[in-house]
């Protein structure tokens, strides 16, 4: 495992609430690079939506929603992607695809969940967690 990713995993437990999300996004980025994804953009925003990371890999353009949780008190990180959040993700992802001239069928929307379990942070990747064409 990448030493920087190991360091970020150790540090997540000591970060303030405001710093936890950005640190989680950095950890997710290193994790995804190790998995062979090329990161194209960070924090892509349009009116009505935002995507934490956009990458290319596995023949797709992938929008990644990164959720970081220190505890399960409010549910798991993956459960934090509500129907309303999924709608905003789809909207922003399609705006990115149009802006860069990618065909919509190349889009996939994944969730990367970073959670503390037994004193260690674990990263879980959920491919196609949000259907690109779903309508909720």
Image (cartoon, rainbow, N blue to C red):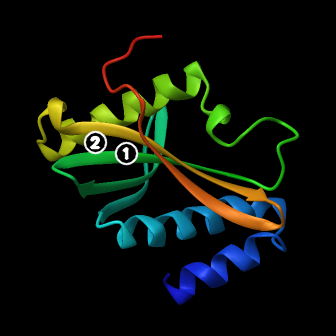
The percent position of residue 59, horizontal first and vertical second, equals 15, 50
- Asked if labels 1 and 2 touch by Cβ distance under 8 angstroms, the answer is yes
In the displayed orientation, state which residue is furthest to the right.
73
Front in this rendered view, residue 46 or 113: 113
Number of on-image labels? 2
Q: Residue at x 55, y 89 (%)?
A: 3
Spot occupied by residue 13 in the image (x, y as percentages of width and height) = 81, 70
Q: CA distance from mark 2 to mark 1?
A: 9 Å
Where is residue 14? Give x, y as percent.
84, 74
Q: Which residue is mark 2?
A: 96
Residue at the limit of the structure toward the bottom, as seen here: 3
Does residue 19 show up?
no
Residue placed under numbered mark 1 in the picture = 63
Q: Is residue 82 visible?
A: yes
Find residue 6 and report its image quarter: bottom right
Name the side, left or right, on which 32 lies relative to 8.
Answer: left
Q: Which numbered marker is on residue 29? A: none
Name the element at disc 1: strand
Compare residues 59 and 133 and report the one nearer the observer: 59
């Amino acid at each position: 495992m990448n030493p920087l990713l190991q360091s970020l995993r150790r540090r997540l437990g000591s970060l303030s609430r405001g710093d936890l999300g950005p640190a989680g996004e950095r950890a997710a980025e290193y994790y995804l690079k190790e998995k062979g994804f090329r990161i194209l953009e960070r924090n892509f925003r349009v009116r009505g939506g935002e995507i934490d990371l956009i990458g290319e890999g596995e023949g797709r353009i992938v929008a990644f929603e990164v959720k970081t949780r220190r505890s399960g008190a409010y549910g798991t990180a993956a459960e934090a992607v509500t129907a309303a959040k999924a709608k905003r993700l789809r909207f922003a992802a399609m705006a990115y695809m149009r802006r860069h001239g990618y065909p919509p069928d190349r889009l996939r929307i994944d969730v990367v969940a970073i959670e503390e379990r037994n004193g260690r942070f674990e990263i879980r990747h959920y491919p196609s967690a949000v259907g690109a064409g779903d309508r909720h």
